[in-house]
Image (tube, grey):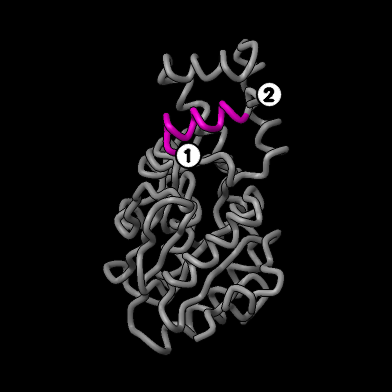
Amino acid sequence: MDKYEEFKININKLINIDLNYYKEKQMKRRIQSLLTRNNFKDFDDYFQGLKRDKALLEQFINYLTINVSEFYRNPNQWDVLEKDIIPSLLSKKKELNLWSSACSTGEEPYSLAMLMTKFLPLYKIKILATDIDEEAMNKAKVGLYNSKALENLPKDFVNRFFTKLENSYKISEDIKKCVEFKKIDLLKDRFPSNVDLILCRNVMIYFTEEAKELLYSKFYNSLSDDGILFVGSTEQIIMPEKYRFKPVRTFFYKKLI
């Protein structure tokens, strides 16, 4: 067995993350650069370091989960959400079950909470935000962001829901209260049920076809009958009918009943 294969088995035992679900070439290259940067000689040596050093292990998990995020990422898609998807969902029920499934440092679920204030009072907005990376979610709970993260956010949201500090912006407690953060491994854990809108954006590109099939099936079962799956701008589902979805707009899919 080569050293990388052994490393994958050991990592799964240590932190319960199965690297087989990630595209191998891409992931192996990322980990190789990380171990070289930390002056380890090979995968065995690096794994021993990860077992010994909690900070090193946290760095590894952060690097693995690729936290790139911003408010209102791909603004045109948020316009579709505002003008089409959410009004359609609210025409069928008064409150929505909303899930940001790979929430990273919080920009996505907080964007959704702010958008929902155009439709509902704050106390009626409840969003589940999940990620595999607890450190990223801890940053989300603090709610401090730099100006670059807010570039695409409508100015009225910035004015209403942020306090400008010396070098950053702090999100309001009112918006934070709308979001509940929880650790979920999309590949291994049980999903919430009867969800009206699932956001899973800029995650699938890192997974193998086998992992994608598993996730589409789990998302299908997680959605309510009229529920919508919202994917990232590089993640259109090829042949969505194969997974029992139909496109309602580009990047938005409804389950086929």
Judged left or right of residue 96, residue 201 is right
Q: Earlier in the sequence, mark 1 or mark 2?
A: 1
Dominant SS of magenta comes to: helix
Residue at the outermost front position: 1
Q: Nearer the viewer, residue 189 or 200?
A: 189
Disc 1, SS = loop
Q: Amino acid at mark 2?
A: Ser
Where is residue 164? Give x, y as percent.
45, 43
Q: Which mark is residue 57?
A: none
Where is residue 161? Give x, y as percent.
41, 55
User: Does the magenta-highlighted stretch encompass residue 12?
Assistant: yes
Question: What residue did someone put label 1 on?
Answer: 17
Q: Residue at x 31, y 51 (%)?
A: 173
Q: Nearer the viewer, residue 31 or 94?
A: 31
Question: What residue did someone put label 2 on?
Answer: 33
Q: Which residues are magenta?
A: 5-16
Where is residue 155? Give x, y as percent.
55, 59
Q: Residue at x 42, y 89 (%)?
A: 91
The correct choice, above or below, for 54 with respect to 65 in the image is: above
Q: Amino acid at mark 1?
A: Ile
Judged left or right of residue 129, residue 28 is right
Q: How many other residues sit within 10 Å of disc 2, few (<14), some (14-19) or many (≥20)?
A: few
Q: Quadrant of the N terminus?
A: top right
C-alpha distance separating marks 1 and 2? 19 Å
Where is residue 150? Give x, y as percent.
56, 50
